[in-house]
Amino acid sequence: MAGFGIYGVVKEAMGDDVGLTEFYHNYFTYPIYKDESLIFYNALGLRQLSLKAVLKETTWWNPYRIYKSYRNLSERLQSKNITGNMKGEGLVQGGIIIFDKAGVARYAYREETGSEIPIHDILLAIQAVRDEDDVGGQQKE
């Protein structure tokens, strides 16, 4: 699906240039920008990761379910060969924002830690924005 740009936004580097470089080379080879004023994170609700959000249906009083949820997440990351480090703050959740040609936010996905990114929904949103931009461009001519 050509005709759009992909950019990464991070809130901090916190002296972890090695981790950010590794992320860039191994997982995300598009331009990455630092959002020191947290504009994008605020647009996504500046949500904080919590144990309850990670465990979802898991109850606090069931240690087996907590362990099972953690193990399932670890296995999924290993199966995708995703590694990371524990540097930086790591609690503010991010997401994906899709803008139209005019720079207006048209779609947002808020990160759900431990869940797969809804690639199909994101591709549909990109296509919808592209279609609307194309129709708008044709009407102006």
Image (tube, rainbow, N blue to C red):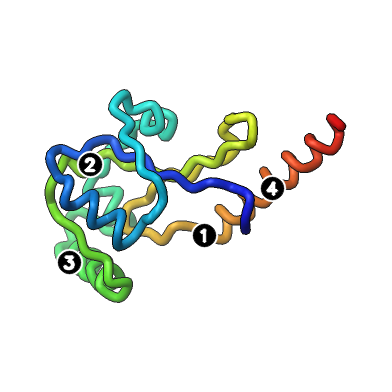
Q: Are marks 2 and 4 in contact (CB under 8 Å)?
A: no
Mark 3 is on which residue type? Tyr
Split into 4 quadrants, where in the image is the C terminus? top right
Q: CA distance from mark 3 to mark 1?
A: 28 Å
The residue at which mark 1 appears reads as: 119
**Mark 2 or mark 3, which is nearer the start of the sequence?**
3
Mark number displayed over residue 67: 3
- At x 17%, y 40%, the residue is 89
Within 10 angstroms of label 2, few (less than 14), some, or many (20 or more) residues? few
- Element type where label 2 sits in the image: loop
Query: Which residue is at 77% across, 42% downward?
Result: 134
> Residue 86: x and y, percent?
13, 52
Which quarter of the image is occupied by the N terminus? Answer: bottom right
Amino acid type of the residue tagged 2 in the rendering? Leu
Observer-side mark, 4 or 3, equals 4
Q: Quadrant of residue 38?
A: top left
Residue of label 4: 128
**In-image side of 116 versus 65 (left or right):** right
Name the residue type under label 1.
Ile
Q: Amino acid at mark 4?
A: Ala
Foreground disc of the pair 3, 2: 2
Q: Position of residue 75 (x, y in %)?
A: 25, 73
- CA distance separating discs 3 and 2: 20 Å
Whichever of labels 2 and 1 marks the residue nearer the N terminus, that label is: 2
Marks 4/3 in contact by CB < 8 Å: the verdict is no
Element type at mark 3 = helix
Residue for point 41% across, 61% down: 116
CA distance separating discs 2 and 4: 32 Å
Tag on residue 91?
A: 2
Q: Earlier in the sequence, mark 4 or mark 1?
A: 1
